[in-house]
Image: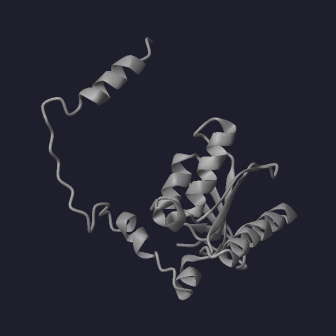
Amino acid sequence: MCSSDSGCYLAFPGCNIIFVIREQGRAMSNKDIRLMRDTVQLSLDHVKKGGIPFSSLVVTKDGQVLGQGVNEVSKSCDPTAHAEIMAIRQACENVGSTNLSGATLYASGEPCALCYMAARFAGITDIVIAADRHEAASSGFDYRWTYNFFENGQPGAGVNIQKLAPENAIEPFETFSAMHRRIA
């Protein structure tokens, strides 16, 4: 799903993926190269401490690092504590908002589907990766199956989802809407 000169596009509208190690993608600036080297070094330091090779930075257009993270899934017993999510959490906390529009996510490995969605929910539209999903898989980190949930239009594949709606099931949503409805 890559176009020749404009970077790589995944099935997440509005999210541009740029491969740093490959020849394709937008021209990388010295700032991009420095930030990716920092991201890879963070990953390498984490591996040397017993972690796995996933790290991430969230950076403003002018190069200010808003957040950084490493994969802490095992350490924190939190299956969502991926490097990208940790960096996004820290960035959001540092700016006091869940809106990181205009920021770029640098990742040592291509984000999984969960992390792509977190980036999109935070308003991040540019993602720069050092290693793609296939390179990560060749090193024993094969999470390519996570993309199938979205590409096949089956977000609940492999999960038994049932709806059980008591009489007030939508009351919290209606109450919230009523409390936040603007008077026009």
Q: Which residue lies most toward the top here?
A: 183
Instruction: Decide which of 112, 68 is in the foreground and name it.
Output: 68
Q: Quadrant of residue 154?
A: bottom left
In the rendered image, the quadrant that contains the C terminus is: top left
Asked if 107 appears above or below 137 in the picture, the reply is: above
Query: Where's residue 77, x and y in %?
Result: 46, 62
Q: Residue at x 31, y 22 (%)?
A: 175
The location of residue 136, given as percent across then percent down, is 57, 80
Drawn side of residue 171 relative to residue 56, left or right: left
Residue placed most toward the observer, 42 or 101: 42
Q: Is residue 174 left or right of residue 71?
A: left
Identified at 41% across, 69% down, the residue is 146
Q: Position of residue 26 (x, y in %)?
A: 73, 66
Q: Position of residue 23 (x, y in %)?
A: 73, 79
Left or right, 70 with respect to 75, comes to: right
Q: Residue at x 61, y 60 (%)?
A: 16
